[in-house]
Image (tube, rainbow, N blue to C red):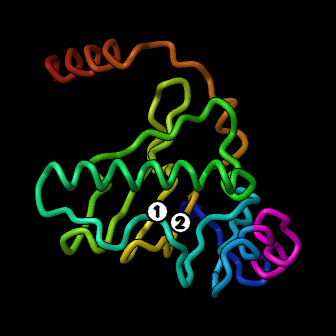
Amino acid sequence: AKPLPIVDVDPVATATWAAGDPAWQAFVAAHPGTWHPRFDRRSGRLSFAWGSGLPFIPADLSADTPEARAKGLDLVERAARAFLAEHAGLARIPGGVELVRDDFRSGELDGGRRWYLRLAARVNGVPVDGIAATFHVNFGSLVQFGFGAITDSMGRAPVPRLSADDAALLARQALAKA
């Protein structure tokens, strides 16, 4: 059997959803310009959107040293978290889901002209592979954001029976026997 895609986007469903979703309507009213949403039929929520941009961070933010890059990424993260708080109805992050910066998949390009941030989902401290909120910034403006595959059921995830350290130990022991 062919696996289902993580996100199932339908242009007709997206147009219907965008016309009737109060959170999306509030977003486009607050941030005029051209915005293109994509609605995920499976999760019943916004998957991602891109558009003409909204002021997000200083356009001249530099990343010419490791210290400047770290400070810039911290600034992008603060702006992203403020965006999530302001537009909570768009993101609809369920209770119990923690978003943690993924430093491996976050950074800058072109000396700080472009920034990308991934806030990976965790439930009860356990990373949920492939689930994240993402933000793309060009020349200081947020031009794309997404909440791919975040669902209401994530907040009801089971509690892990093993700590991360215990699971790693068991995995090492299993590999040693192989």
Contact between labelled residues 2 and 1, with CB atoms less than 8 Å apart: yes
- Residue 110 appears in the rendering: yes
Q: Secondary structure at mark 2?
A: strand
Left/right of residue 53 with respect to residue 71 in the rendered view: right
- Residue 34, labelled with which disc? none
Point out residue 89 in the picture as x, y percentages from the top left corner.
Answer: 75, 54
**Residue corresponding to mark 1:** 135
**Residue drawn at (48%, 54%) of the image:** 79
Q: Magenta stretch: dominant SS?
A: helix
Point out residue 117 in the picture as x, y percentages from the top left corner.
Answer: 39, 57
Q: Residue furthest left?
A: 65
Q: Residue furthest right?
A: 20
**In the image, which residues are magenta?**
14-26
Q: Nearer the viewer, residue 26 or 176?
A: 26
- Residue 145, labelled with which disc? 2
Left/right of residue 127 with respect to residue 145 in the rendered view: left
Give above or below for 161 relative to 78. above
**Residue drawn at (68%, 82%) of the image:** 32
Q: Mark 1 is on which residue type? A: Phe
